[in-house]
Image (tube, helix red, strand yellow):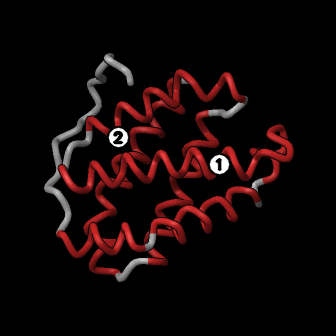
């Protein structure tokens, strides 16, 4: 994890309700699988991974989901910042551009909104929007 902290606004958010967290947890597999499916359709972003593209995307989104779950339960945005900072440093070595990460986060948000009941998705969206905005900043810096 990165020890470097940005000046990006990160007022802590309130943890989501137990019901929203449970809904997220119960739908994690569906969210990951559908995000991977849609991400694989963006061939120009994954072709260089070859036959392991689905496996790599699934592993990355599984990690993102675990970090999201921790942030949702605690309200700590620093957990998400650390993940994105790590990705910024590590993923380019695997040929993953910051714009690809941004696109996948947007797909992830869409899938969460389509999968969860709206009252739970509404609680989770501030965390997803924060991640997308932070990733947009990293993408523009790159």
Residue furthest to the top: 4
Name the quarter where the N terminus is drawn.
top left
Q: Nearer the viewer, residue 34 or 58?
A: 58
Q: Nearer the viewer, residue 36 or 43?
A: 36
- Alpha-carbon neighbours of circle 1 within 10 Å: few (<14), some, or many (≥20)? many
Q: Secondary structure at mark 2?
A: helix
Q: Secondary structure at mark 1?
A: helix
Residue 107 vertical placement versus 30 (above, below): above
At x 70%, y 49%, the residue is: 55
Q: Which mark is residue 35?
A: none
Residue 30 in the figure: left or right of residue 13: right
Spot occupied by residue 69 in the image (x, y as percentages of width and height): 33, 55
Q: CA distance from mark 2 to mark 1?
A: 18 Å
Residue furthest to the bottom: 117
| Mark 2 lies on residue | 80
Residue 80 in the figure: left or right of residue 33: left
Q: Earlier in the sequence, mark 2 or mark 1?
A: 1
At x 33%, y 62%, the residue is: 125
Residue 8 vertical placement versus 99 (above, below): above
Name the quarter where the C terminus is drawn.
top right
The quadrant where residue 72 appears: bottom left
Q: Nearer the viewer, residue 28 or 114?
A: 28
Residue 121 in the figure: left or right of residue 111: left
| Mark 1 lies on residue | 57
Mark 2 or mark 1, whichever is nearer to me: 1
At x 46%, y 27%, the residue is: 86
């Amino acid at each position: 994890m990165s020890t470097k902290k940005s000046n990006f606004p990160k007022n802590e958010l309130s943890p989501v309700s137990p019901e929203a967290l449970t809904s997220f947890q119960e739908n994690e597999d569906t969210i990951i699988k559908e995000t991977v499916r849609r991400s694989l359709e963006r061939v120009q972003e994954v072709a260089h991974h070859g036959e392991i593209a689905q496996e790599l995307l699934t592993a990355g989104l599984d990690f993102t989901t675990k970090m999201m779950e921790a942030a949702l339960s605690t309200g700590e945005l620093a957990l998400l910042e650390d993940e994105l900072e790590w990705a910024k440093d590590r993923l380019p070595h695997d040929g993953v551009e910051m714009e690809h990460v941004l696109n996948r986060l947007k797909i992830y948000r869409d899938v969460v909104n389509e999968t969860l009941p709206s009252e739970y998705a509404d609680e989770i969206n501030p965390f997803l929007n924060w991640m997308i905005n932070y990733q947009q900043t990293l993408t523009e810096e790159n």
